[in-house]
Image (cartoon, rainbow, N blue to C red):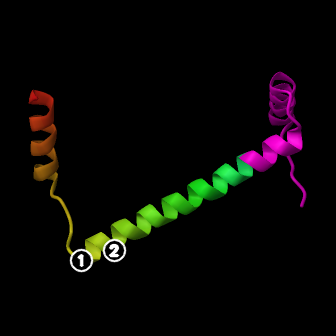
Amino acid sequence: MELHLTPETEAKLNELALRTHRGTDELLEEAVDHLVVWNQWLHDKVNGSITAVERGETTTDDQVRDWLERRERS
């Protein structure tokens, strides 16, 4: 796999590697792992929300406003 970075991003990555005493490959692998996990989390949340809406589990704007107001008062 090939990765193309802007010179600015590459410089920041190199500086981070020096500062943290880690290799750039290790940092990139960690970043990609985090991206994949985050993307899966977001996908699951969106699909869960769509499923909830399909089941009719929704909250109106007024209900949200009321909840926020009660929360601010307490």
Residue identifier under label 1: 55
Residue 60 place in picture, x, y as percent: 15, 57
**Residue 62 at x, y = what percent?**
10, 50
Alpha-carbon span between mark 2 and mark 1: 6 Å
**In the orientation shown, which residue stands out farthest toward the top?**
19
Circle 2 SS class: helix
Which residue is painted at 87% across and 25% down in the image? 18
Give the vertical position of 13 relative to 28 (above or below).
above
- Image quadrant for the N terminus? bottom right
> For numbered disc 1, what is the local secondary structure?
loop
Q: Are marks 2 and 1 in contact (CB under 8 Å)?
A: yes
Q: Is residue 29 magenta?
A: yes
- Magenta stretch: includes residue 66: no
Magenta span: 1-30
Count the marks: how many?
2
Task: Please tell me whether the stretch drawn in magenta is mainly helix, strand or loop.
Answer: helix
Q: Residue 51: which numbered mark, if any? A: 2
For the C terminus, the quadrant is: top left
Q: Position of residue 30 (x, y in %)?
A: 74, 46
Label 2 Cα neighbours within 10 Å, binned few <14 / some 14-19 / many ≥20: few
